[in-house]
Image: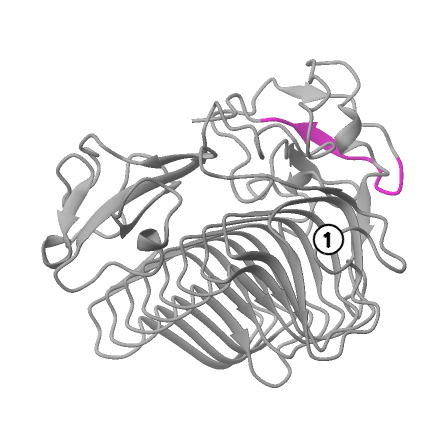
Amino acid sequence: NLLSYSNTGHGIYLGTVTNGSITNAKCYSNGGRGMMTNVVSGYTFQNFITANNNNDGFGFYEASDSKVFNLKTYNNLGYGFNLTGSGSDNNTIVAVLSANNNSYGISSGAASGNTWAFITSVNNNGYGMGVGGDTVTITQVMTSNNLNYGMAFQGTTAKAAQLNIANSTNAIWFYDTSTNHFTGNLVVGGNCVFSGTNTNPGLQNATCDAQNTSNNVTTTGVSHTSSYVGKVTSTDGSNGSNSNGTSAFASVTDWINFSDMYRAWGEDGSAFANSDHQGHCDGAETCRIWDWRLATGDTASLNKSHDGTNANPAWTNGANCPANVHGNVAISDQKASSQTYLLNAIELISDTAGDNDGLCESNEACIYAPNFGYYQGEGTYSGNTCTFQNGTVTGVTMYRLGTNGG
């Protein structure tokens, strides 16, 4: 466990190291980045909060062959998560909530072989997720109410599946990109737009329908206006700085403690989703605690990972697992040593099996993912099991969380 706050520089700086781990770290109100790496290889970063830092929340610079699992990054002056630098290749980044940052929620620069999964990026003052480089694999992403674009692709040979993007000016922007492949569900509330030279970008202009080798199923006209629990309007008793969910920025001293793990500070603003929510809360502004669980009444993402439109097949304890978590509903990433994993399940990190990168691979214990993005339910998984049907991925012990929807 590590707590780093109010430093003039970075909260944590890690340089020129290999094969280690940092777990359960909270970095906030630092003068630089919350977490900063520089030439790191073979490292694991697990259960991080980076909040209200004066630069990026998590600066992943020149990092390779490393894992990030369960990061909550919010109200930072720079990017929520910034992967960049020469040789930042073959990393696995799973389970990220990036909200109310003053630039992109997620930025992945000119690097190769990186795999991203189970990302929610919302209310950022830049793109929800900007992807550069080549041979990137992106699955299970939900972006909402970000400035300009929900996602942006600039690079080559990206592979993407299970994307749910809405309430930005345009859903996806392609710039000088080629040979991308989209599969699974693509749920959008907005257009696909193009700049520069794009050769077989994988989706069609405007409609976002499949192009070239892509075989995604596109659903359009979606809104996330009612998708999240949203603004907290009663006092969060676990947070020492709020009254009825708000505080003047200057009075916020508790940036990290909340009654549930899906809460974070951000702009107050008007009714969601609106441009006055985008970016970080600072200066003379009133800040608001937001709850980024999917609401029980959500019709855009909750319990929709099977086809993006209809409710998922029912889960019955002890029976065969639902069709959307069959062993053939899988993807192989583009790392130097490729991994094949289920699209709609997340590895159970708390056990001793598997490689603990968050991707559900053969012979691992996993949690069913009924939704799009970071939130996949809450509560206990004990006693909630189904009989896994082998396919490309085999031998999985599948659980589900007891409650889905806040």
Determine whether, in the image, residue 318 is placed left or right of residue 132. right
Q: Is residue 342 visible?
A: no
| Image quadrant where residue 312 sits | top right
| Image quadrant where residue 43 sits | bottom right
- Decide: is 357 above or below 312: below
Determine whether, in the image, residue 73 is placed left or right of residue 334. left
Q: Residues within 10 Å of mark 1 (few under 14, many from 20)?
A: many
Q: Specify whether residue 342 is painted magenta.
A: no
Q: Nearer the viewer, residue 138 or 188?
A: 188
- Residues shaded magenta: 391-400
The image quadrant where one finds the C terminus is top left
| Image quadrant where residue 397 sits | top right
What secondary structure is marked by label 1?
Answer: loop
Measured from the top left, where is residue 57 in percent x and y?
Answer: 38, 66
Measured from the top left, where is residue 205 in percent x and y?
Answer: 74, 60
Determine whether, in the image, residue 405 is placed left or right of residue 162. left
Measured from the top left, where is residue 6 in percent x and y?
Answer: 19, 68
Dominant secondary structure of the residues highlighted in magenta in the image: loop
Q: What residue does disc 1 label?
A: 208
Which residue in the rendered view is the most extreme toward the left? 251
Residue drawn at (81%, 32%) of the image = 326
Q: Specify whether residue 398 is painted magenta.
A: yes
- Which amino acid does the dot numbered 1 rest on? Cys
